[in-house]
Amino acid sequence: MRHTPRRRWAALTSVAVVGALALTACSSSSSSSSSSAAPESSAAESSAAPESSAAESPAAAECTTPTPVSLQLQWVAQAQFAGYYAAKELGYYDEQCLDVTILEGGVDIVPQTVLAQGGADFAISWVPKALASIEQGAAITNVAQVFQRSGTLQVSFADKGITTAADFKGKKIGNWGFGNEYEVFAAITKAGLDPAADVELVQQQFDMAALLNGEIDAAEAMTYNEYAQVLEAINPATGALYTPEDFNVVDYNEEGVAMYQDAIWASTERLADPAYQELTQKFVTASLQGWIHCRDNAQECADIVLAAGTKLGASHQLWQMNEVNKLIWPSPAGVGIIDAALWEQTVAVALTTKNLEGATIITGEPPAEAYTNQFAEAANAELTAAGLNTTGDAFAPIAVTLAEGGN
Amino acid sequence: MGARLRSIWPPVLIAVLALAAWQLLVVVRNIPPYLLPSPSLIAGNFFKDISLMWGAAFYTGTSALLGLMFGTFLGVLAALLAQRFIVVNNLITPLAAGLAAVPIIALTPILNNMFNITSRTPRVLVTTIIVFFPIFVNVIRGLVQVQPVQLELMRSMNASPRTVLRILRIPNAIPFFFTGMKVAAPLAVIAALVAEYFGGPQEGLGSRIASNAANTAYGRAWAYVAAAIITGLLFYVIVILLERWVAPWTSRPRPAS
């Protein structure tokens, strides 16, 4: 091949173009996913969003360019995350000068790992799963413990007579695996049974078909999701929907093995940066404000979530909103604040519960940076000063009627 | 013996170098386990929990073996029928191709709902379906692609189709059968493993890998992956040994014609 000057130029140019493309690909993938939420143009006004109905907006600062923020959810869009969708829809994030992108989760998405790897600015995750990630080197901190109670149940048909964990003996007990099984194992161990020998453990799919078909005796369910799915199914014997009287539930809070669930997690390394601290404070305040709104306006928040593209029906989302409210409210010390005793219970269960492989969730105590009440306490102060009730002591759940299939 | 040793050392050397580079990367860059576990962590987990590894591999291996046996039996049967009756051939071939295109991850939840999720059945069925196609395609090719001159000889002696099958087609098809098996055997392990992602008994390799990955215990997850690789390789080696035993003439070099 003749190395003419033109050929050499062409070769150099093509190498340079390919190299530039490769470099841009590398740099854009390593930067945080905030690139997906383009900041509004400099002509963006300050909080142009509608004010929340009952209270004044806590934030007052002028906002020229909202900061792009991404939140990684633990599952798909549903009322379990209504507070964040509401905060976005009702402008609470805008008032704090934040442009929030909500990233839906899924079966194989581990939100705390996404956070630790820089793929999101904040993540929603259950405490035990996050503790396991922390032990494997992910540096994350719990900045707001939104759910104060565990929503995990073991649901079975009433004729099986399974009312406590001790009744699991010799039965087929379903669980989801994927890190969701530890309360089940803890209850089995606490009842003096051996999970490997005394109980037949079966991994459920993320629906209740196995329970309704009679293939398993007791299924793992969340109060706000799968339990509603059985109540939305038609009872072949009566032709009407199943009623709560058709089932027994084992509540892991009552079994004494409940662990803290949904919480907002932030990156520990970035928390050393004052700018990120301020960002976290704003995000927590606006998110908790969203949750307070959803406590008092359950139907409105269920509608917001429906509009965000959830695949579950309207009555199912209202049920979910109501049940999630029951898990959050009342928050005796204030919404999002961690109770040290319950944290210790969560850590104790995580340290001592063995799964099928004989492994525990964590092998050592979590570091002190694993959680902080600093941001939640400041948020509570700010929201209370704005006239909002942050403990929910007067909260009363509403009555929800489910329709077939959750529609 | 010397020749065999000389052919083994390059891949072994490359594997050792790759593992050493991986270990060096993790140690020097101080990469935390939740991002990339080191080979030493994986090996540590593997040998510490060796009984768990063996148990999980045995469970998945049994599902794979059952699926492999059923799939092979059905594949061979279908190939024999398709070779003999052109109608059957026209019926089965597009059906088999269609089945081969259905991904495991779509098939498994459906079969889980159709059959009892607490049993092995959905997983063995998935494996059977996946194994069917390579066996069927290879065996039918072996049955059909006989040398024309040999076929003419048979016809000139007025041999019945059954005789042609017995004397000509089946011996011709044996190397093709083993080609199909060499593809199907590791595929059976993969199919059995992936089918465990979607629910059912949790003792197998697939469930364990998914569960440990979700718990951020990547060291143990990779150890199970290593066990899965070993299981797949074991199946492959067994097929090779079977081929040497049943059809030793295939491994001897052919004389130049």
Image (cartoon, helix red, strand yellow):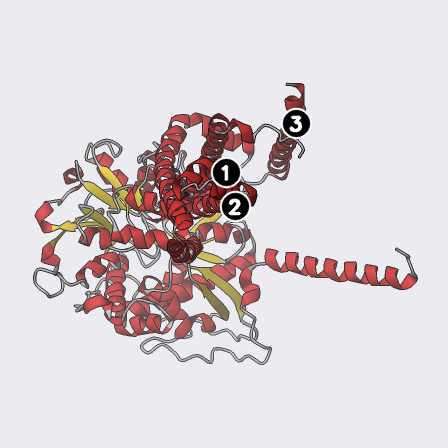
Residue drawn at the location 38% of the way across and 61% of the way down: A76
Where in the figure is residue A317, as x and y percent of width and height? Answer: 27, 67
For residue B129, above or below residue B91: above
Give the residue type that dot 1 points to.
Answer: Asn
* B156, A203: nearer the viewer: B156
**Residue A6, image quadrant:** bottom right
Closer to the camera in the image, B101 or B87: B87
In the picture, measured across the screen, residue A21 lies left or right of residue A360, that is right
- Type of amino acid at the residue the image marks with label 2: Gln
Residue located beneath label 1 in the image: B172
Label 2: how many Cα within 10 Å (few below 14, some 14–19, many 20+): few
Q: Alpha-carbon distance for marks 1 and 3?
A: 30 Å
Mark toward the start of the polypeptide (1 vs 2)? 2
Which residue is identified by label 2?
B145
**Residue type of the residue flagged with mark 3:** Ser
Q: Are marks 1 and 2 in contact (CB under 8 Å)?
A: yes
Q: Secondary structure at mark 2?
A: loop
Q: Where residue A165 sits: x, y (%)?
A: 18, 41
Which residue is situated farthest in the front direction here? B157
Quarter of the figure with the N terminus of chain B: top right
Q: Nearer the viewer, mark 3 or mark 2?
A: 2
Q: Nearest the camera: A124 or B23?
A: B23
Q: Is residue A197 visible?
A: yes
Whether label 1 touches label 3, CB < 8 Å: no
Q: Comparing marks 1 and 3, which lies closer to the viewer? A: 1
Chain hosting mark 2: B
> What label sits on residue B7 in the rendered view?
3
Quadrant occupied by the C terminus of chain B:
top right
